[in-house]
Image (cartoon, coloured by chain):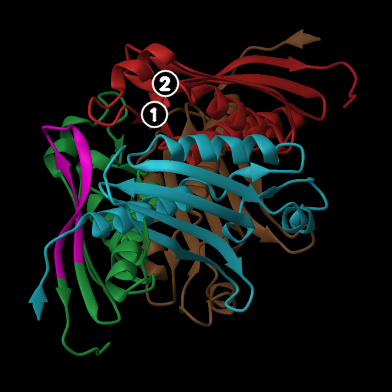
Chain colours: A cyan, B red, C brown, D green
Amino acid sequence: MIREKVTDRDNALFEAGIKLGALYHQFTGSPVNLDTVSSLEHAIQESISVQPYVKEISVKIDRDMLKSRLNNEFGYTELQGLMLDVKITVKFGSVKVKVGMKYNAELNYPLMKIDELEELEETSN
Amino acid sequence: MIREKVTDRDNALFEAGIKLGALYHQFTGSPVNLDTVSSLEHAIQESISVQPYVKEISVKIDRDMLKSRLNNEFGYTELQGLMLDVKITVKFGSVKVKVGMKYNAELNYPLMKIDELEELEETSN
Amino acid sequence: MIREKVTDRDNALFEAGIKLGALYHQFTGSPVNLDTVSSLEHAIQESISVQPYVKEISVKIDRDMLKSRLNNEFGYTELQGLMLDVKITVKFGSVKVKVGMKYNAELNYPLMKIDELEELEETSN
Amino acid sequence: MIREKVTDRDNALFEAGIKLGALYHQFTGSPVNLDTVSSLEHAIQESISVQPYVKEISVKIDRDMLKSRLNNEFGYTELQGLMLDVKITVKFGSVKVKVGMKYNAELNYPLMKIDELEELEETSN
């Protein structure tokens, strides 16, 4: 067992994970239909963008999946993790990381993963 | 003890309560600052408007309270119940009810209450 | 249009609705499997029981539905509204109301409804 | 700019962040008082423990802070991030990481951080 020193890279990944976990558990369950989906996407994006170290964020809700799940009687559904396509760029010190969440059909799971990792040569915010 | 028949009025009040409880527990905790507060207000309003029997809804987040709670280090805070001023009109059958949630300073509590109750003479959606 | 005075009965129904809306949007989305479902049921029950005017509450999560939705890869799922069977008794002044939420297969919807309504002859808390 | 390959260490940190973000945004807002705080702690702990790669988790809610925030009129409050003391151990491949969330009085913020990081010499689940 070797104890390691915590690096910018470690913190960048940790912070990126926090944002995805927060987004998911804050906003899934929100009532939504095709008329209101844009305002929900926009608000989620803006809300998570105010958290520390977030540089960019894009949030897309799958309209086809949403449409297929609208309740026949009441004409709406709830935001589910499976509908979300999210990309977040986090920068911590000298490291920039892009992470995302996207429905993985094989696993039938809204999979969160690390998409890209860069060690920047100089640190500028 | 007298068992009572459930009326439109009963259902209107019950449905109105559901909407306020849902709104509160779905959206409090959302990260927010002064730049993003409008999109959050708008999304909450639209989200709850798709639920059954909602005729009108207005959602205001108190900017002064929000500003006073911004974290010094990170420049944002979370939506708290105390910041919310909500008015919802629900119609069920022949009854229309206006309910609201607003910070009550004396109780230090985001108080939900029935503001207005009307039995309509004819039912039209 | 006739404006009506707000009665204990109105408030009992309104408060009962608040509790169901709150429960649903606070706790759906919680990670859960067959080993942890009891502690989640228990905590939901206790949590909502502390809210004003709640006299009794029972929360059941459908094990069969839960089991059928466990993710093959990761062995857990999330609490969904469809899995919930909830009964709440609220008392406001001279009125006691029993409300509930239960999956309605025909509507494919977690339906909330008023189950019983009693005007008590004398008011005792 | 140097693109980096994603390691077990990166994934361990990313997954650990997800768990803390999820826990925070799923459970803050839950109604709670001194009689029900234990069942809430227990349920949060069990709920997050079912998520992928979690090896250990401890959740403590600060009783003093809770007590100081009980509403005078209604005798309960809501779980706030500031009340939480959480420790989570995540293992991904050959790396084990301990992360935590704890109220930081100086920042007046529920700070999440990496507490310990170990590269294991051999991988065993």
Q: Quadrant of the C terminus of chain A?
A: top left
Q: Is residue C113 above or below residue B43?
A: below
**Labels 2 and 1 touching (C-beta < 8 A):** yes
Q: Is residue C118 among the parts visible in the rendering? A: no
Marks counted in the figure total 2
Given the image, on which type of amino acid does mark 1 rest? Gln
Secondary structure under the numbered disc 2 in the rendered image: helix
Q: Which residues are magenta?
A: D98-117
- Which sits in the foreground, D102 or A114? A114
Q: Position of residue B98 (x, y in %)?
A: 65, 18
Q: Which residue is mark 2?
A: B83
> Looking at the picture, does residue B22 appear above or below residue A87?
above
Q: Amino acid at mark 2?
A: Met
Secondary element at tag 1: loop
Give coordinates of residue C65: x percent, y percent: 59, 73
- The residues bearing labels 2 and 1 have C-alpha atoms spaced at a distance of 6 Å
x, y percentage for residue C8? Answer: 55, 24
Question: On the image, which quarter does residue C49 sit in?
Answer: top left
Main SS of the magenta part reads strand
Q: Nearer the viewer, residue D74 or A116?
A: A116
Residue D110 sits inside the magenta stretch: yes
Residue that numbered label 1 is attached to: B80
Residue at image coords 22%, 55%: D38
Q: Chain of mark 2?
A: B
The N terminus of chain A is located in which quarter? bottom left
Judging depth in this view, the residue of A102 and B88 nearest the camera is A102
Determine the image quadrant of residue D82. top left
Magenta-colored stretch includes residue B32: no
- Residue for point 56% across, 60% down: C80
Label 2 and label 1 in one chain: yes
